Image (cartoon, helix red, strand yellow):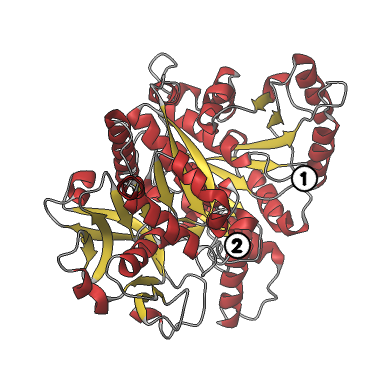
Amino acid sequence: MPTDPETGYDPEMGEKFIFVTGGVMSGLGKGITAASTGRLLANAGFDVTAVKIDPYLNVDAGTMNPYQHGEVYVLKDGGEVDLDLGNYERFLDIDMTFDHNVTTGKAYKHVIEKERAGDYLGKTVQIIPHITDEIKRRIREAAEGHDVCIVEVGGTVGDIESMPFLEALRQFATEQDEDDFLLTHVTLVPYSKNGEQKTKPTQHSVKELRSIGLQPDVLVGRCDDGLDEETKEKIALFCDVPTDAVFSNPDVEDIYHVPLVVEEEGLDDYVMQELDLTDRAVSSEERSTAWRELVTQETEGEVDIALVGKYALEDAYMSIHEALKHAGLEKNVDVNVLWVDSDEMDDDHEERLKEADGIVVPGGFGSRGTEGKIEAIRYARENDVPFLGLCLGFQMAVVEYARNVLGLEGANSAESDDDTPHPVIDILPEQYEIEDMGGTMRLGAHETDIESDTLAQEVYGDTSCTERHRHRYEVNPEYFEDFDGEPMVFSGHAGNRMEILELDDHPYFFGTQFHPEFRSRPDRASPPFVGLLDGVLEEKANGSKTSDAEEREEVEA
């Protein structure tokens, strides 16, 4: 089939495709199932990429509240996307682009813009073929040049908003050779009160899928435990798949163990068999075991890190949680994250800080919770607690120092207080005239120059680094002179932009305007996070120090 001159769709692009859909309910773990499948195929020697389909009307995830979809993950090209793309990057150790995320808003926006430009030559623009071809085009272009492309279809089968994507998927299946297309369906297998694994939700979900012309090739059951053989046989019978095509994805202690669990069930071998990849795969004896060895290694201790934020859910700070975990893997310790609500710092939350070996203050937007973050930073600075500030955490460290050390009373960020007498943090100059909120911040990968003979150089082992950004505000150049000769120094910069700060004579006080957590990987931990654990472990090895506050109390006594 040649390229469609009207829609630009080329059905020949791409090689092997695995589509992953979900049924019964959202949040089952389609993304982790897809990422785990990709990890196993990569272990077998294949070049794997991934695409995430999000059926919402937003063009991207940038304007979404974290309570809705968790954190906004930032790609190297500045794409603001769903957190599942972060899982793909971490599991597959790849750098993705905005083209690997397809949303309803993105597809419709492109088609409507072409219609307004007259590109359809007067034809009626419709869901089929124009929207479905646009969806398929985006998938195939993202897959080009890779052995296998895994496509996760967000949402739940049966949702109205998902229908154009599922129709595109149905067309995709007819266009591909049988051994180039695989449909994996993830469903819930709950327990009844008498402890029986119930298959009816899976049966109804598959029935819904089949009603729109799609027959799953692989079924993955999410359950507290592995599926019983009897449960697998029943699912196979009622859903018209071989028993060998039914797999378990039980709850595990750590998401990085999911590839190990599904590998033990033989998911990778079955997928390669169905896609006619077995003969091209690295033999099972020669496949990489680095992932298994890394995530199952024995640890030699644990540390407690306080995460001081305002969104009371783990998904809002997923990449930070994972970056701490990665640093723990490198330092061979378990990292326990203690949640501290920055909105409630006056309500005994200082007790949580006293329990912590280190403190992380993450990014965020708006004024809510900023005063609590400032107090947490002050506590870390005055009590020699290892500290890492990220984006807004970096900015609040500047504010805290300006207020409490430089004596700039009322110092603040202009984002939090338009009337502050000392806007030590101010909006980026290029942001003054911007009205649209979506995709207009300083986004994506940018290089930072690092001063020699600084903690930053020690942390990164180099005089430059490239990290991902997502912010509108930065250190106000008018206050640079106030920091001259101070123990707090800006050791990383990009032109006139301050990117890294550090504090002399402190176990570890480090802040970054960028988000290093987005580039952290299980086998390649983010340097600032490793530095934080180095500081924590050194302090633990030296024994607890007497805090400044305790010293003052002793003197007064």
**Rendered location of residue 200, percent (x, y):** 86, 32
In the rendered view, does 242 fall on the left or right side of 432? right
Residue drawn at point x = 65 percent, y = 44 percent: 173
Q: Earlier in the sequence, mark 2 or mark 1?
A: 2
Q: Residue furthest right?
A: 194
Helix, strand or loop status at disc 1: loop
Quarter of the figure with residue 385: top left
Mark 1: few, some, or many residues within 10 Å (few <14, many ≥20)?
some
Amino acid of disc 1:
Gly
- What residue would you read off at disc 1? 213
Picture coordinates of residue 346, whole percent (x, y)? 55, 57
Q: Is residue 310 visible?
A: no
Residue at figure coordinates x 15%, y 57% from the top left: 451
Residue type of the residue flagged with mark 2: Asn
Viewer-proximal residue among 517 and 286: 517
Relative depth, front residue between 382 and 55: 382
